[in-house]
Amino acid sequence: MEISIEAASNQLAALGDLLRDVQEAALAKATERPMTEIATLFSVRHCDQFTVGWLASVLGVTHSAAVRIADRLSGEGLLQRTPQANRRFVGLVLTEAGVAEADRLLAIRRQVLTDLFSGLEPLLLAAQPLAAALLQRHTTSELVSYQRCRFCDEALCGETCPVDRACQRLPSNGAG
């Protein structure tokens, strides 16, 4: 039975929903944190130039919501604010405890994806070029790259990250 392009696209979209749902369920079970806090931990973990304004843009929340997220994580000793040369901006970095929490949650994410794809490794590797092509094609700015990878375990991609490769070809617009 032959499948149409529309049906294949629809199934891939449903797969995207499944992947997000499985990850979010595992992370919700492991912590009572909202996904915005988890995305903050992951995002700041892999970037040394995060600011509250950039966080708001990456998460798609208001500046005041990003401040509240930073306040909660800072209050738990997971995040600290750092002074910036331009005093209008407040930098964000993870503390040692924040790095440990981000790494713990990334390990949970990694395990749930390993379990999900168990026994399907050849299909997964065959689908990887499609995933890379779509990610590259739809990385149109540095901000989009951070939005796309806000739940990523960037250490796994390394130099093979299609979003990084696409971003490197774009004019730099800085994180700030």
Image: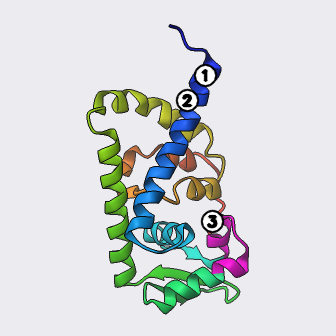
The answer to whether the residue labelled 2 contacts the one labelled 1, judged by CB atoms less than 8 Å apart, is: yes
Q: Which mark is residue 163?
A: none
Q: Secondary structure at mark 3?
A: helix
Say whether residue 71 is left or right of residue 56: left
Q: Identify the disc placed on residue 59.
A: 3
Q: Amino acid at mark 1?
A: Ala
Magenta region includes residue 58 = yes
Q: Left or right? Give the position of 76 relative to 4.
A: left
Q: Examine the image and state in which quarter residue 110 appears.
A: bottom left
Q: Which mark is residue 11?
A: 2
Q: Position of residue 61 (x, y in %)?
A: 69, 69
| Nearer the observer, 1 or 125 | 1
- The label nearer to you, 3 versus 1, is 1
Circle 3: residue type: Leu
Residue hosting label 1: 7
Give, as a three-letter code, the residue at label 2. Answer: Gln
Can residue 111 be seen? yes
State whether residue 164 appears in this view: no
